[in-house]
Image: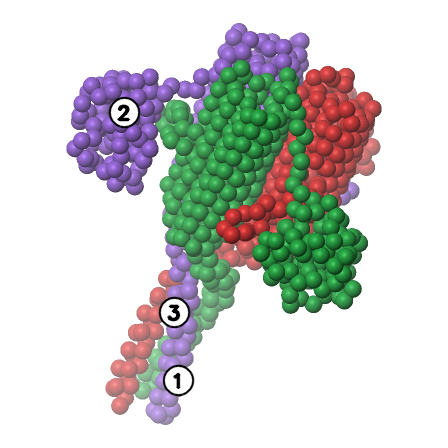
Chain colours: A green, B purple, C red
Amino acid sequence: MEATLAQLCEAIASFGLKPQLDGDPDCVIRRAATLEDAEAGDVSFLSNPKYEKMLQTTAASAVVLKPDVEAPEKLNCIRVDDPYAAITILIVKLHGYRQHRRVPPSSAAVIHETAQIGENAAIHPGATIDANVKIGAEAVIYPGCYVGPRCCLGNNVLLFPNVVLYDDTVLGDRVTIHANTVIGEDGLGYAPHEGRWVKIPQVGHVEIEDDVEIGANCAIDRATLGKTVIGHGTKFSNLIAIGHGTQIGPHCLFVAQAGLAGSVNVGEHVTMAGQVGVVGHIRIGNNATIGAKAGVTSNIPDGETVLGQPAIPIGEMRRQVVYTQRLPELTRKVKELEAELKALRKAIDDSAFRAS
Amino acid sequence: MEATLAQLCEAIASFGLKPQLDGDPDCVIRRAATLEDAEAGDVSFLSNPKYEKMLQTTAASAVVLKPDVEAPEKLNCIRVDDPYAAITILIVKLHGYRQHRRVPPSSAAVIHETAQIGENAAIHPGATIDANVKIGAEAVIYPGCYVGPRCCLGNNVLLFPNVVLYDDTVLGDRVTIHANTVIGEDGLGYAPHEGRWVKIPQVGHVEIEDDVEIGANCAIDRATLGKTVIGHGTKFSNLIAIGHGTQIGPHCLFVAQAGLAGSVNVGEHVTMAGQVGVVGHIRIGNNATIGAKAGVTSNIPDGETVLGQPAIPIGEMRRQVVYTQRLPELTRKVKELEAELKALRKAIDDSAFRAS
Amino acid sequence: MEATLAQLCEAIASFGLKPQLDGDPDCVIRRAATLEDAEAGDVSFLSNPKYEKMLQTTAASAVVLKPDVEAPEKLNCIRVDDPYAAITILIVKLHGYRQHRRVPPSSAAVIHETAQIGENAAIHPGATIDANVKIGAEAVIYPGCYVGPRCCLGNNVLLFPNVVLYDDTVLGDRVTIHANTVIGEDGLGYAPHEGRWVKIPQVGHVEIEDDVEIGANCAIDRATLGKTVIGHGTKFSNLIAIGHGTQIGPHCLFVAQAGLAGSVNVGEHVTMAGQVGVVGHIRIGNNATIGAKAGVTSNIPDGETVLGQPAIPIGEMRRQVVYTQRLPELTRKVKELEAELKALRKAIDDSAFRAS
């Protein structure tokens, strides 16, 4: 949907930001694009200062950027304190969210006779809805999805193709799960018995609260007993593994390939960067940030940022990295000291000898 | 299935453990639950001492715990040396294992005319069974599974939804594979030729022996030549990658996101913790334990426990971590030594001057 | 297809290699096999010197190996400078590539009326082709695949079962994607707003160029704006995560479980070993090699090989590992220096006292 710069500024302002337009309010914008890809008729943005020089070469008709950044005169500028928030608003206005094809309740989808399907829900051909499932209104279930016995899905749930929900999984309203993710599989629960692993029935389940979005190819174990929980508003990237009984608070952000063992308790607004690993039975405090590839082996207090394997506060970790990089130098210095001390000892012995 | 505490103790005793009941043998138990979630009518357990204080607040009617742990008087206690083994027995008794819906041979499943399906096997609608496949008795193949040409599956094999078996995969009896796992895809086999990668046909296959359980979203490469093997009784968690031609012994336990390159030889009873990486063409000895996130780059002897990147024996690694954390202190000390040595040198020079 | 050793040498020679046959040119070979598994009638090879002793015990009828390697007299030897390239040629000749069962355009595949399917393409039952898709000639789409609206697939594309292509994905000619991989899912694009994460519509897409092969269970994010690109001839193993807007050059090789954040720019002929992680918004130069488990946090120049977390040039990293392993020794030495210095100080003080 195209809009003039004046209209775009209005949209930004309606969210409480205060955009300042340097340029032509009647200029018509059709698309959002990166500085690199933009063409005439596009709006772009500068959030990361790294890309500032691209302002000189971009073909965009307008750019969203901070008040103090210099830009070529010919460029229409929407200046705002938070360009990232503002471009988000513009992308929504210009492009909207993905629309999903609606299908009538289909004979090619396999829906168990005991399942209850909400109003206007679209169950695509090739999906399977098992016994005693409840699905809320306006849900979209793509081909190849499997919704196991007794699962309960809220309104406006969106399952991309080939998502698998094991028995008794609970999804809140507006939960989105990307393709090929698995929710509620059995965790690694075995008791050793005479050199063999005896399977412990995994009788718990998974609950995913409202407004959660889970990426592609993730795997979230059901609890052995009780439940695994993903708190409302939390967002996952791809290929994330969550162990049985782990409970994650609201509004967290997990980057790809993070892995948490079982019975971890994660607070709210926690960030886990890529490839993080967390051992079982610990607590990650509210607003904690776990740096990329960190291996967390003990409780993390609220608000802490950690890094490294084992993970320690990021300042300490960075210092440790610097000291480690200086190890060759330190080793050389110790050798010199040894030599000097030896020389000194000799000098003294000689002088003592002379003195005697 | 509910049972009295007397009956539960009997069940535990029948496995050779010696439970001691402190409490009411006629108390009726309906469920197993965690200390936190338990309600009246539930049996819980204490295995990890970390959770001992929850004994004071749990609403469970009974708890399985070690002989020497103190518990509130009102709590029925089943005391036993191995509470984890005992609660496993009780979960099996009270809840049993997941039951799978049986379906008649279905017209909605695509079964090639040359496939042989064993007695009472359930091939769900939406599954595909390709040419010359053999499937044993009582197998359950969920929707969306694809069983490629010439695969051979034993009795009681269980494939959760969307499992893909490439051509010629062999599964023993009672093999369970969780949703969206892929077995037998081509490995990364290419020969460089004039700046391009030329694909080497991957003509081997994968064999998975009896009683193996594989988690969700794993990928196990077929061998280039010969076979990739997962030994009997071995258990995998989720998102595990196994390279072509790797052979893993019996009764191993692999935690989520572990990755092994090709042509690795793993012994029996080996434990790989989460996010472990192992380079190709090495041997991991029997009963070895690879700690979380370790990067294994050389042979590991039988019984060794390693940690770190590159992985070294765990005692050395822990020492190394401690020494590294003390690096700032060591560096400061070396500076002090330098200063002191300089002062001393000056003192001697002065004194030598005075002496002369 | 069986062949004589003379014919096999001819095949090798036709690729520009110069094989030398020590043995019977009329010996008939039926299969390629590893030294360990080979039987009479098989050809094997020795490329990794580690396995040299197996020449003594192999039952192979012939072996491909380097000119200077000693082999038992009875063994027919094809001697060539690059045995790996030669055996690749022989595997292709003896076994060929996997043949895919062709199916007629099937009523059991769900193909949208607006989709255009190329000549002789095989869309298997259980696949879904959505609106306005174009699929080239001779493509093979296995069961359970989902090809989203407006995707455009070249000729001879091969999608193994359960591959999911989100809307607007572009695949070049001869692209192969292994089972359960997802292309074009939304990346982790959210703007923070009053403690919640607001989804940014991901309006970009993914382009995969000619001759790319992607392993199983990978996830490649669409770009927020613009496109994510995988360059021609690049090969991926399994469980790899690529962030939104990342662009990868031609002829790269990525090992399993590697993960790249968004907006990374990767050159050509880059190798990423297993479990590598790369932060966003950096450049990896042409012909760079990233060692296993490395965590790359800054630009890597052309041709560099790096290792470690954070990744540094491999020589430095190895030195650092050695120095770190010697830390206990260094610490001990510093303690000795301290003691010795203290003794020296005392000796001087005593001697000064005596001298005064």
Residue C191: x and y, percent? 58, 50
Quadrant, the N terminus of chain A: top right
Q: Give me the residue at 75% from left, 66% from top.
A: A72
Q: Amino acid at mark 3?
A: Lys
The numbered mark at residue B346 is 1
**Sequence-earlier tag: 2 or 3:** 2
What chain does badge 1 belong to?
Answer: B
Asked which quadrant contains residue B307, the reply is top left
Residue B94: x and y, percent? 33, 20
Q: Secondary structure at mark 2?
A: loop
Q: Give me the residue at 61% from left, 24% from top.
A: A123
Seen in the picture, residue A170 relative to A238 is either above or below; the reply is above
Q: Inspect this view and state whether residue C52 appears.
A: no
**Residues at marks 2 and 1, common chain?**
yes
Decide: few, some or many residues near mark 3? Use Cα within 10 Å; few <14, some 14-19, many ≥20. some
The numbered mark at residue C104 is none
Decide: few, some or many residues near mark 2? Use Cα within 10 Å; few <14, some 14-19, many ≥20. some
Seen in the picture, residue B94 relative to A228 is either above or below; the reply is above
Distance between the Cα atoms at labels 3 and 1?
20 Å
The numbered mark at residue B41 is 2
**Sequence-earlier tag: 2 or 1:** 2
What chain does badge 2 belong to?
Answer: B
Q: Pointer 3: what residue?
A: B333
Q: Amino acid at mark 1?
A: Lys
**Sequence-earlier tag: 3 or 1:** 3
